[in-house]
Amino acid sequence: MKIKMLKPGSTLIELVAVAGLMAILSALLATLVAQSLKSYRESRQIVELQGNAAMAIKDFESITRGATEIVVSAPDELAFYAYMVGDDYPAPTLVRYYTENGELLRSTIAPSGEGPTFTYPTEDELVNKIIKHVLNTDTIFTYYNEASAEVAAPAPVDTVRMIRITINVGYTDKATPTDITETTVVSLRNLKNNL
């Protein structure tokens, strides 16, 4: 084994200077990598929030548009009857959107019984998580009447003809620099008077 000797003229001061320069360069590189990872993580979280909010809006639009009767019209809860795609029930499904623990949930209860009167047993309720990280859990729904005028919540259920949903999502630890807001207005086609 051959041991490499220092070149003649190398001093301890030069070695310390090289070691210090290497430490500075390593620290700069580590900072650059850390900032890049943080930026990537924030960008990924924003894209995830936007995608989830858009899917939640699409879910809400597709199901709510076919509402046949509004049952609850509160700022944080909406319940209605609707015929859902794939249903083979003789009566509509009871659908409820509500918030709980920072999540927007959709529950459905299929009708039970032979008719003409049907029941909706709460033990048959199926709950789906629509979106997490909802920040505006108390004011997610706004209601409008036939003249497109906003109706104060809780809105009288017989006056509701359009519903605005506004979903404001973000991480509570503020890992993302901004919150994401998605909104849409759904016209209840089965409840219109001017058909």
Image (cartoon, rainbow, N blue to C red):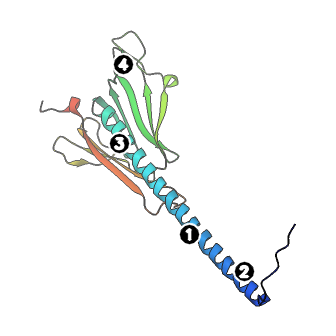
- Mark 3 crowdedness (10 Å alpha carbons): few <14, some 14-19, many ≥20: many
Query: How much space separates mark 4 and mark 3, taking CA atoms?
Result: 22 Å
Q: Residue at x 37, y 54 (%)?
A: 181
Q: Nearer the viewer, mark 3 or mark 2?
A: 2
Name the residue nearer the viewer: 193 or 85.
85
Please tell me whether mark 4 sits on a helix, a strand or a loop: loop
Mark 2: amino acid: Ala
Please tell me whether mark 2 sits on a helix, a strand or a loop: helix
Q: Judge from the rendering whether residue 82 lies leftward or rightward of residue 194; answer left or right.
A: right
Give the mark nearer the N terminus: 4 vs 1: 1
Give the mark nearer the N terminus: 1 vs 3: 1
Query: How much space separates mark 4 and mark 1, taking CA atoms?
Result: 55 Å
Q: Judge from the rendering whether residue 172 lies leftward or rightward of residue 182; answer left or right.
A: right
Query: How much space separates mark 3 and mark 2, taking CA atoms?
Result: 57 Å
Q: Quadrant of the C terminus?
A: top left
Mark drawn on residue 19 = 2
Would you say the residues marked 2 and 4 are in contact, meaning their CB atoms lie under 8 Å apart? Answer: no
In this rendering, the answer to whether 109 lies above or below 33 is above
Mark 4: amino acid: Asp
Mark drawn on residue 131 = none
Mark 1: amino acid: Leu
Query: How much space separates mark 1 and mark 3, taking CA atoms?
Result: 38 Å
- Residue at which label 1 appears: 32
In this rendering, the answer to whether 109 lies above or below 42 is above
Name the residue nearer the viewer: 190 or 23.
23
Give the mark nearer the N terminus: 2 vs 4: 2
Q: Judge from the rendering whether residue 127 lies leftward or rightward of residue 24; answer left or right.
A: left
- Residue at which label 3 appears: 57
In this rendering, the answer to whether 137 lies above or below 66 is below
- Residue at which label 4 appears: 87
